[in-house]
Each structure stands twice: as C-alpha cells, then as structure tokens.
Image (cartoon, rainbow, N blue to C red):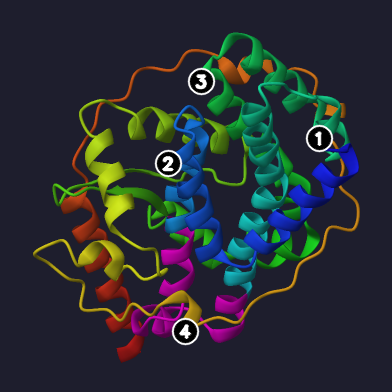
Amino acid sequence: MKQSKIINEIKRKTEIGNIDNISRTVIYEGFYKKNPEIKWALLAGLVSRNAGWNMTDLKSKWFQQLITGPFSDLLFQTFERANWTIFADAYPQLLWYEFSKKQKHADFSLLKQLEVSEFMQKEWKWFWDFGDEERLCTSLIINEQFTIEEPVMKHPLYQKKVFSSLVYFLEEHAHMSYVIFPSMEKKIYGLYVRNFKKVKSRIWLGRQLQSLLFHPEIHDSIYQFCLATVPTGSRNDYEQYFRWSTGNTSPKLRETYPIVAHHWKKKIDWSQSVKKTECYFSNLRKIQPVDRTKWLQKKWIEIYLMQKVKGSL
C-alpha cells in the first residue's frame, strides 16, 4: 500500500474515533484487547473513563449547586480539549504500530509524516527493536503530557480562567481531583492528582498509575471491570457494582453534552525544545495497591456537605 493511502486511512480513522469521550474510551480499551503489549492503551482508556465521570459530575445536582454554569462549561471544555488533543496525537501512532505489526515491517518515515514528535519516533524504534513494554508506556505518558502543555495547560483562556481560579485551587488542595480504577471485587484503587499544572507532576502521576494498574494483585480485576462495563460517562458505571451510592445524580455523557468540534492550527514538536527527557524514566518506588473505597466515600460526603452549606447560604 502506498504511503499516502496509509496516512490518509490513519487520519480518517483518527477523526472518526475522536468524536467524544465515549468513542475514545472504547477505542483505547479495544486497542489494548487486540494489542496487550501496548500497556498505555489500557491506561489511557481508564483515564478517559475518569475524564467522562468528571465531565458529567459537572451537571450533577451537587456540582450544579457548587459551581456556576459558565465555569462548569469551561471546566468541561478543558477536559474535552485535553483528551481530544491526546487522542489526536496518540491514536495515529497506535494505528501505525498495528499496521506495522500486521505487515511485520515498520516504516518509521510514516511517523514523521504523521507529525509524531521526534522523541516518540526514537522510542517507537527502540520498542520495535527491543520490545520494552514498560519503557514504551512511560514514553507515551511523557509524550502525552508534553503534548497538552502548550495547547491546553498554557493556553491563555484555560490558564487565566481555570488553572488560576480559586475554585480550582480549593478543589486541588482538598484532594477532590483523583484518578480511580474500579475493580470487579467491589474495591476502588487510585491516586490523587496533585500539582496538575506541572508537567513533571503529571508524568509522575501517569507512571504511578501505570504501576498500579499493572500490579499483579489487582490488574485482572480492573481489566475485567473494563470488559464488563460499557462506558457511558456516568459514575453509575462503577457504582452499580457496589453496595453504596452517593445519592447524587450521575447523567450519561451523550445525554448531557453535544459533540464539540476541535481543530489544531499548528502542531509543534515539543521535543525540539525539551532535550533532557531521560530524567523522566528514573526508577520510582514500587507502589502497593491500597483500597480507596472508604476514602472515596469520605470525599463524597465532604462534597455533599459543601453543597448543602452553599445551598443554605
């Protein structure tokens, strides 16, 4: 097949898949099912599920009491833009790999034509030669976080209206933002999102989540949750398995938000200006799974009380 046809097909599939949070989640997890050596795909699927729950939370009765409509819509746009950007950059790479795997030959020049960062071009070559699954997963984590740094994290609108806001500050320091992994054992695992504005902290978080997700004691139960649970963007996706419920409303994403059109004016290769990347591969202390179910219940009680107090005022 000619290079131009391959490129066009990859771009076509990426555009179709990058419709909304639900389509991205399904594609990431479906890709992992076919290509389990690409661990990042499953991690991306679960993080995408979290993004969906965070989006629909904004339209729940508790959060509508806590956050104004305009700021709620801006938070949704921030989640949506970040996740769209990551998919737009990462999925062409996954499709390139899947095609190369079937052909048993890798044409690395295609990655350049797909505007993949030089950093990831080198990492894909390393993976193709040595099959280092852990390093590739870490590389994709590093790449995705630097990819969203300029167009999302440092975008003037999000920088001023979201990441510099008092509401964001209070939410982060109250540990209300977190990434969770539900399991079929009716337990929840996860980590806090701290210093989210700093790329170093986001990479650290991604690597810790990678370690947690693939811990042999809990991996199968979390993966079975993914296989058994069609993503809707609602927190009922996991609450349905537990003996408790928040009592908050939890709408489905496609019944809550319209499709958002995005575009990328000019894609810049972040690795042209960030040369020292090996430090992000440094060894981390091994993480042990901790059941966060009671912690999560406590956080939801805090949110419930906050919205009751605000309502009374």
Expressed as whole percent of the image width and height from the top left, the position of residue 243 reads 8, 64
Question: What kind of element bears circle 2?
Answer: helix
Q: Quadrant of the C terminus?
A: bottom left
Which residues make up the magenta segment? 50-73
Q: Which residue is mark 3?
A: 133
- Tell me, yes or no, whether the two marked residues, 1 and 2, touch with CB atoms within 8 Å: no
What residue is shown at x 46% (from left), y 60% (from top)? 170
Q: Which mark sits nearer the N-terminus, 3 or 4? A: 3
Q: Which mark is residue 33?
A: 2
Question: What kind of element bears circle 1?
Answer: helix
* Residue 58 counted in the magenta span: yes
Q: Which mark is residue 270?
A: 1
**Can I make out residue 308 in this image?**
yes
Viewer-side label of 1, 3: 3
What residue is shown at x 80% (from left), y 60% (from top)? 156
Expressed as whole percent of the image width and height from the top left, the position of residue 228 reads 27, 56
The residue type indicated by label 4 comes to Glu
The residue type indicated by label 2 comes to Lys
* Residue 226 counted in the magenta span: no
Question: What kind of element bears circle 3?
Answer: helix
- Where is 12 relative to 118, above or below? below
Q: Which mark is residue 255?
A: 4
Expressed as whole percent of the image width and height from the top left, the position of residue 192 reads 39, 45
**Can I make out residue 164 in this image?**
no
